[in-house]
Image: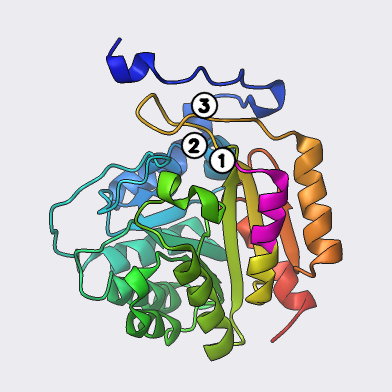
């Protein structure tokens, strides 16, 4: 054991409500084989999502473009760090569009690694993917989960001009923990991104998410939710942080299902969000297709 590992505080015992069955090959094989065939990455695999079995068995996946390496090294994330400048693959959007078509998806989530090495942060690749999906599957609703583009608002405008149905940008954690968990992120900048989307493209549904269990208090979570609502964010996801390994940030606490439900009720009943998805296993795109119901109930 290394000195750094020996100083790592012992994490609390994982409670029963966080135990999920390991995904079985026969349940996820069709989606996994398609991804291999089309040489595509998913955040489900790269970020070790605990819901991979459920989502793959249901024929859904969150596509991870411009990866798999990321130019940021956030200590909570299991995606590999890659500081090398890599050209974009011009065939990636076409292959992604083909995957959406083959899977018959009615709703697709497209996210990316951070590409701070690119002048536009990869905005043009997002646009290419939107166009490819619409060409092959014109009825599919499209949700983007984007990085902050280092505050390049022209890059944001490029993405928004392609008119995604849902724009998601995760706030990730409370302001006090940004230096610890998201050292290259800036809390006010993320809020500004969401505000700009709402003001500039009011027909787009906005979404954000955060992890709990990194050392924040319940009161801090509620304040972040209030900040998001002040930017007129429509949907919030809240899930339990699970440490990918000894080199990543440890879990400081396991939030109970009852507290997750309290976050949901407060967000929907008191703060006015259209939807708060809050549970131990919730992730950014977990059950993302439910947004179609919200779009019917709250048309724009």
Q: Is residue 190 above or below residue 44?
A: below
| Mark 3 → mark 1, Cα distance in angstroms | 9 Å
Q: Is residue 105 above or below residue 126?
A: above
Q: Secondary structure at mark 2?
A: helix
* Numbered badge on residue 298: none
Q: Is residue 254 above or below residue 206?
A: above
Considering every residue shown, the one lying at the far front of the view is: 176
| Mark 1 → mark 2, Cα distance in angstroms | 5 Å
**Between 192 and 282, which is closer to the camera in this rendering?**
192
Q: Identify the residue position indicated by label 2 in the image.
A: 28
**Between 231 and 287, which is closer to the camera in this rendering?**
231
Q: Secondary structure at mark 1?
A: helix
Q: Identify the residue position indicated by label 1 in the image.
A: 57
Q: Identify the residue position indicated by label 3 in the image.
A: 24
> Which residue is pictured at 54% across the width and 24% down the height?
22
For label 2, count other residues whose C-alpha is less than 10 Å away and answer few (under 14), some (14-19) or many (20+). some
Q: Position of residue 63 (x, y in %)?
A: 41, 56
Considering every residue shown, the one lying at the far right of the view is: 269
Q: Is residue 119 above or below residue 54?
A: below
Q: Are marks 1 and 2 in contact (CB under 8 Å)?
A: yes
Q: Is residue 60 visible?
A: no
Q: What stretch of residues is rendered in magenta?
A: 215-225
The disc, 3 or 1, on the residue closer to the chain's N-terminal end is 3
């Amino acid at each position: 054991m290394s000195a750094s590992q020996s100083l790592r505080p012992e994490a609390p015992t994982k409670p029963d409500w966080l135990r999920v069955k390991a995904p079985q090959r026969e349940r996820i094989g069709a989606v996994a084989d398609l991804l291999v065939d089309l040489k595509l990455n998913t955040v489900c695999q790269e970020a070790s999502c605990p819901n991979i079995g459920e989502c793959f068995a249901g024929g859904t996946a969150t596509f991870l473009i411009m990866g798999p390496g990321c130019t940021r090294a956030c200590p909570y994330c299991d995606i590999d760090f890659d500081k090398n400048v890599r050209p974009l693959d011009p065939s990636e959007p076409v292959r992604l569009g083909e995957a959406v078509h083959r899977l018959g998806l009615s709703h697709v989530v497209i996210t990316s690694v951070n590409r701070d090495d690119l002048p536009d942060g990869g905005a043009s690749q997002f646009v290419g993917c939107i166009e490819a999906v619409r060409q092959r599957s014109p009825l599919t609703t499209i949700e983007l989960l984007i990085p902050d583009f280092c505050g390049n608002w022209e890059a944001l405008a490029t993405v928004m001009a392609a008119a995604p149905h849902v724009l998601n940008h995760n706030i990730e954690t409370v302001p006090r923990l940004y230096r610890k968990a998201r050292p290259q992120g800036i809390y006010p900048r993320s809020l500004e991104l969401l505000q700009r989307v709402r003001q500039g493209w009011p027909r787009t549904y906005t979404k954000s998410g955060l992890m709990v269990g990194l050392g924040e208090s319940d009161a801090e979570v509620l304040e972040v939710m209030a900040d998001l609502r002040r930017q007129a964010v429509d949907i919030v996801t809240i899930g339990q942080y699970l440490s990918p390994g000894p080199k990543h940030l440890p879990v400081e606490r396991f939030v109970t299902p009852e507290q997750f439900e309290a976050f949901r009720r407060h967000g929907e009943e008191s703060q006015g969000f259209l939807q708060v998805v809050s549970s131990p296993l919730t992730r950014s795109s977990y059950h993302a297709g439910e947004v179609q119901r919200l779009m019917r109930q709250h048309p724009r």
